[in-house]
Image (cartoon, helix red, strand yellow):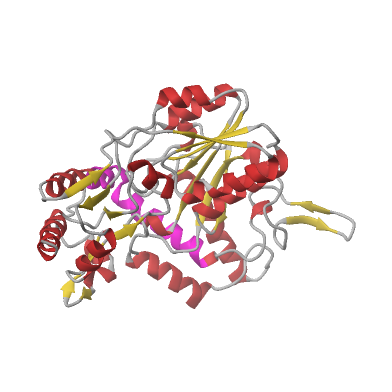
Amino acid sequence: MGQPHYTGDHIRKDFPILDTRIHDKPLIYLDNAATTQKPQCVIDAVTRYYTTQNANIHRGIHTLSEAATAKYEAVRQRVGAFIGADANYTVVFVRGATEAINLAAHGFARAWIKANDEILITGMEHHANIVPWQLLCEATDATLRVVPLNETGELNMDEFDRLLNERTKLVALTHASNVLGTVNPVQDICAKARAQGAVSLIDGAQSAPHTPINVAAMDADFFVFSGHKMYGPTGIGVLCGRTEWLERMPPYQGGGGAIHSVTFEKTTFAEPPRKFEAGTPHIAGVLGLGAAIDYVSGIGIDAIAAHERELLLYATDALADIEGVTLIGAARKKVGILSFTMDGIHPHDIAQLLDSHGIAIRAGHHCAQPLMQFYGIHATARASFALYNTQEEIESLANALRAVREVFA
């Protein structure tokens, strides 16, 4: 499809929360990197499940259970198609990107990582892609290595090449930084990891909603993302893994649905993905995620990416003109995330005063404290864009920031 008319009403009308008023002002929601708002079709999918389709899945032989199972598994197929996962990959449903990374870390901790092995991450990672690997290293006496970045917010690839070696067993990095918006060269990195015999994991929480994804072309071993950052429900996410690895990995949790047989002497487990989906899953969340993927696909991810790119460029120019504003991160390739500071004003104060204008942004360290330390700051304010945002909203943001400047003048 062609690029939709984002300045019109037909996209924004799909999101009922955008009619909300905050402090008697129209809501301007620019906190999309934390979570996106939900279109009515997603809300309807969740409601419809609970009102007309509610049943547990997989082992039931009654009509509702069989129908719910079919819908649940159909979403698994749509997720794989959306992210370009071919027959070599399996989609596992989890609570979010954080659980997906922990699942991978758990499997590697028990199966492949040993003393003196190395895990390679980057200096721009979210805590969710740092802490699990730290715990793994503590448990196995492996070593965590960190690829540095430069002041523009891009990875130092010469250092990546130097750090990648025969002891590297896993390379885990973000596809797009939740603070800087930097889009990393993941296809090149995955190829280099594979050539060295290392496994790759890509955190797509900030990329899957905003740019086309093709996991097979990327050649990643694992790719993770969260539904709630892609217009879907909270509490649902995806680990897309190379099937050969998932077959070898031990289960993350034990329980019903994940097993083939159980005796008091021994348990044998089901094949992936069932092996990693113990217990009753978030069925409504999966169906809501399916509706979100259908919605995004109907608009066109390329059109969404182009629109958000225009917003990012417009916002970059608008905020750069404001006295005292410093933009953090100037990578050549970015998604629609803009972090900034204002001289003499704490980011929390910026966010609180913007809220009085009806504008929602995020302020803090964004679960990326090592990155804050690299830039010598404690926090930033962060505006992040989605398909329903407009240039008029960015103009309102810029005007409100000038008003914030006046308060502290």
Relative depth, front residue between 217 and 373: 373
Number of labels in the image equals: 0
Residue 261 relative to residue 168: left or right: right
Q: Horizontal and vertical percent for residue 49?
A: 49, 71
Instruction: Write down the quadrant of residue 28 in the picture.
Output: bottom left
Q: Main secondary structure of the magenta part?
A: helix
Closer to the camera in the image, 387 or 409 = 409
What is the x, y in percent for residue 393?
A: 16, 59
Q: Which residues are magenta?
A: 284-308
Q: Nearer the viewer, residue 400 or 304?
A: 400
Q: Which x, y percent locates residue 314?
A: 15, 46
On the question of residue 48 being in view, the answer is yes
Above or below 186: residue 299: below
Quadrant, the C terminus: bottom left
Any magenta on residue 73?
A: no
The vertical placement of 390 against 65, above or below, is above
Q: Is residue 215 above or below residue 160?
A: below
Please tell me in which quadrant of the rendered image residue 39 appears.
bottom left
Q: Residue at x 38, y 33 (%)?
A: 149
The quadrant the N terminus occupies is top left
Which residue is at the front of the view, 241 or 120?
120
Q: Is residue 300 magenta?
A: yes
Q: Which residue is found at the position 17% from the left and 69% from the top?
A: 357
Which residue is pictured at 70% across the width and 60% down the height?
257
Asked whether residue 75 is in view, the answer is: no
Toward which corner of the image does residue 345 lie, by quadrant? bottom left
Q: Residue 145's x, y, as percent? A: 53, 34
